[in-house]
Image (cartoon, rainbow, N blue to C red):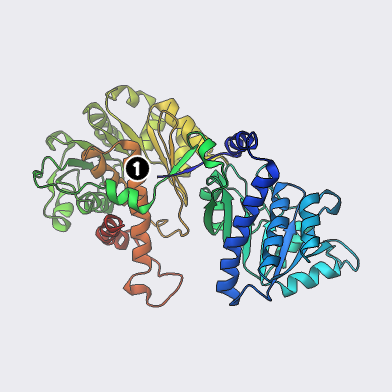
Amino acid sequence: MQGAWTPDQVRDAERSVFTSTPEPVVMRRAAFAVAVHGARLLAETAGAVAGRHVVLLVGAGGNGGDALWAGVEFRRRGAGVTALLLSPDKAHPAGSAALRRAGGVLVDAAGPGADTAGVGAAAAGALERADLVVDGIVGLSARGSLRPLAAELVSRVAAPVVAVDLPSGVDPITGAVDGPAVDADLTVTFGGRKPGHVLGTGSVRSGAVVVAGIGVAEHLPEPDLFVLDAADVGAGWPVPRPQDDKYSQGVVGVAAGSATYPGAAVLATGSAVQATSGMVRYAGSAADLVRSHWPEVVATGSITDAGRVQAWAVGPGIGTGASGREVLRHALESGRPVCADADSITLLAEDPTLWDARDPDAAVVLTPHAGEFQRLAGEVGADRVAAAREVARRFDVVLLLKGNTTVVAAPDGRVLVNPSVHAWPATAGSGDVLTGLIGALLAAGIDPWLACGYAAHAHALAAELAAFGPEAGDDPVGAPIGASALLRSVPAAIRALRAS
């Protein structure tokens, strides 16, 4: 399991490092890492490093110093280097001097011959010739979008970009981008990932993220966020053991669907089946339809007749009237873990007395999208992690906040994030599939926080496999999918994760 640390946590760790290692030495280590990984990218995209042209976008902070020292390393590898200084009087003195000695060229980005956008002639020419650009404009303390001159320079970049620590213009805490920002092909960060690498737009803007060890990692505290990788999910996903039977593998109950939304029942129940549950019990008005699609499911018309289960997945398509309220109440009273989605969340928001039915010893998982979250607790806001943490703590639940980056918060403050570079799961019925996956994992006895993380990861992978499956042909952006296609890809996703 990977971690992500806030800028404050990283700065505290750096201060600990500086007590035994001079700060300039640490900067040189960071710059060397940027140059090594940048040189690999340059060799891949331009065929060589020697004889190519590297442009540094240099701001006033430490990241600008890292970029300048990286320029020295590029010069040693035979590349031409031009540093565009956004604030020449504030550029890192030692880095600037070292680059001059190495034969690099330092240019005032707004120097002589500036065009109508304020970019100097030498700077404009350097960007036109660039084979690689290093983004050292701002550091982790910066907030907000790029200033006009920096934004104009970035808009003219056509070459691959290596970002120092985090792409400039991306919020380091939330990953949000509210204006001009750098799109990096590669980000070299130090000690550990930052929240901005895995949240919001930042997870896409960062490109491939490489964590360079510069002596900081051993001084870092517990991560602020966790990110599961495929190996984590594959190792944790329940599979039958030799001594297992259908009951010991977990019996999940699904209460979903109605005359108006029968498809929700089919999708949620099918997902629980595909997730390797030992047994799936369905309760609801769509029992006949569910049996026709999934004959292995034990289906009944009422939740009171469903029989014993180890967890409930309840909510998709049950409606927000009296019958839906009673279904949710029964699940909450069962003493079993409950994954409450869709209409269940609306019911809990509209009728807080339903919380009184909850068994205090049984876990509850809520899986809202932004609109359902608003009904429950108000606007999500820019800081999705803080919002999810607060609601998880307030209601004593595990909260899975849906989005391109899924955020899973436990009541004790732990947070998992599942970043995704695509939006294929954003289709009607997709949430019903996720509900079934979570319910199956809860029934298997997986910790609810991890169950949500595993399910979100598998769900995103299944959507990707569906989008780039046979129907997509050679289309590099994938073919549009529906929730049924996503559901059919769940077994393939689980197999791929198990093989990781």
Q: Nearer the viewer, residue 357 or 172?
A: 172
Indicate the quadrant containing the N terminus: top left, top right, bottom left or bottom right. top left
Indicate the quadrant containing the C terminus: top left, top right, bottom left or bottom right. bottom left
Residue occupying the point 15% across, 48% down: 240
Residue occupying the point 42% across, 28% down: 412
Is residue 106 visible in this depiction of the protein? Answer: yes
Position of 384 with respect to 414 (left or right) is right
Position of 58 with respect to 471 (left or right) is right
Position of 200 with respect to 62 (left or right) is left
| Residue matched to label 1 | 452
For disc 1, the neighbor class at 10 Å (few under 14, some 14 to 19, many from 20) is many
Q: Position of residue 195 (x, y in %)?
A: 54, 44
Residue occupying the point 27% across, 23% down: 361
Q: Nearer the viewer, residue 118 or 498?
A: 498
Q: Is residue 474 placed above or below 295 in the rendered structure?
A: below
Residue type at tag 1: Cys
Q: Position of residue 469 (x, y in %)?
A: 33, 70
Q: Position of residue 167 (x, y in %)?
A: 63, 54
Q: Is residue 38 placed above or below 317 in the rendered structure?
A: below
Q: Position of residue 31 (x, y in %)?
A: 65, 54
The quadrant holding residue 323 is top left
Which residue is most to the right? 112
Q: Nearer the viewer, residue 217 or 242?
A: 217
